[in-house]
Amino acid sequence: MSDGPTRLTLLTRAGCHLCETAAETLVRIGAEAGLVPETVDVDTDPGLQAEFGDRVPVVLLDGREHSYFTVDVVRLRRDLGLS
């Protein structure tokens, strides 16, 4: 991980039920770690849409892909030092 503050980002799109579930999970886990997840709609950025558009939601931890379709809760908690 980086030496700066941890960044937790969810790549999503409007109307995605998996994205809504992932967002709820990230808010809960982020709060435990003192983090507020950022949500980015892939459809607002052609580069993100091209790279991630067919497999949202995608969780990024410090800008690196952590999981997609579902939040890997066990791994995320471990990587955030919560387990």
Image: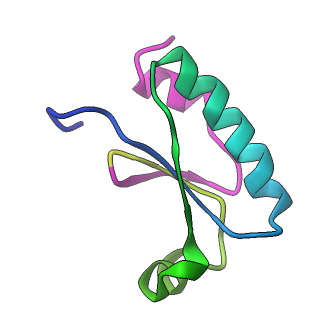
Q: Based on the displayed image, in which of its 4 quarters is residue 13 positioned?
A: bottom right
Q: Quadrant of the N terminus?
A: top left
Q: Is residue 8 above or below residue 5?
A: below
Q: Which residue is drawn at the image coordinates 51% and 40% (left, top)? A: 37
Which sits in the foreground, 20 or 57? 20
Q: Which residue is drawn at the image coordinates 47% and 21% (left, top)? A: 78
Total label count?
A: 0
Q: Tell me: 63 left or right of 45.
A: left
Q: Which residue is drawn at the image coordinates 36% and 41% (left, top)? A: 7
Which sits in the foreground, 81 or 20? 20
- Per the rendered image, the range of residues in magenta is 63-83
Residue 10 among magenta residues: no
Q: Tell me: 81 left or right of 16.
A: left
Q: Is residue 4 above or below residue 74?
A: below
Q: Is residue 61 above or below residue 46?
A: above
Q: Position of residue 48 (x, y in %)?
A: 47, 77
Q: Which residue is drawn at the image coordinates 19% and 38% (left, top)? A: 2
Q: Position of residue 36 (x, y in %)?
A: 50, 33
Q: Position of residue 65 (x, y in %)?
A: 44, 55
Q: Tell me: 19 left or right of 44.
A: right
